[in-house]
Image (cartoon, grey):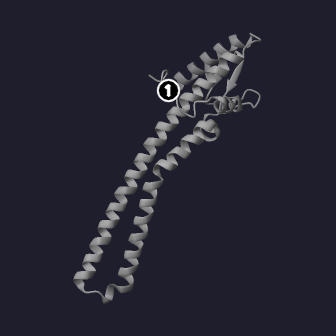
Amino acid sequence: MMKTMINVVMLAYLLFAGFAHSADFKVGVVDTERVLREAVPAMNAEKKIEREFSGRDEEIKNMIKQAKELQALLEKEGAAMSDAEHRNKERELTALNVDLQRMQREFREDLNLRKNEELAAVLELANKAIQTIADTEKFDLILQEAVYRNPKIDITDKVIKQLAADKTDGKPDSKESK
């Protein structure tokens, strides 16, 4: 593993050493996480997901409130209830909690799935914007992930501005995505 890592580093060094002699070599770095937070399509996707899931979120909140009220009723008036009525209320609370846990689990799974779908679409748009910038400004290399990025070569702001300028409203071109 270490030998492979050394070989990769040496190969990268040799490649970049050759490019370093060329005065025209142009490198850029993009902070993908920042693009996914600040770009217009990313913010539109977030709002879209919030609207899409707000109804289910409200339903879950109502169920939580209902379970708390039933729990409070059992604690407050449980001793005054008949055994049958007390058992029925406990069964009702148990069933409500089971349904609530199922709904919360499904909600989280569906929400994560939709977020991943929307983020994939935003990343596709970001990659197209990066390609446009690379072609327009004659970049030789653009990296999307780096441990360290010098602000002089960070083109994240350009990518965010390019995405804002695109009139795609956060959706990939249907012709190109097929």
Crowd class of label 1 (few under 14; some 14 to 19; many from 20; radius 10 Å): few
Residue 16 x/y as whole percent = 67, 15
State the residue at coordinates (55%, 46%): 47
How many circles with numbers are drawn on the protein? 1
Name the secondary structure under disc 1: loop
Q: In the rendered image, which quarter is residue 60 located in? A: bottom left
| Amino acid marked by disc 1 | Met
Is 15 placed above or below 76 here? above
State the residue at coordinates (58%, 26%): 127
State the residue at coordinates (33%, 61%): 99
Q: Which quadrant is home to the C terminus?
A: top left
Residue 140: tell me if it is visible. Answer: no
Q: In the rendered image, which quarter is residue 159 located in? A: top right
Residue 145 x/y as whole percent = 61, 30
Which of these two is toward me, 17 or 96?
96
Which of these two is toward me, 28 or 90?
90
Residue 94: tell me if it is visible. Answer: yes
Residue farthest toward the front in the current orientation of the protein: 167
Which of these two is toward me, 43 or 109?
43
Q: Which residue is mark 1?
A: 1
Is 2 placed above or below 93 here? above
Q: Is residue 144 left or right of residue 77?
A: right
Residue farthest toward the bottom in the current orientation of the protein: 80
State the residue at coordinates (22%, 82%): 84
Residue 59 x/y as whole percent = 42, 60
Residue farthest toward the left in the current orientation of the protein: 84
Residue 131 x/y as whole percent = 61, 20
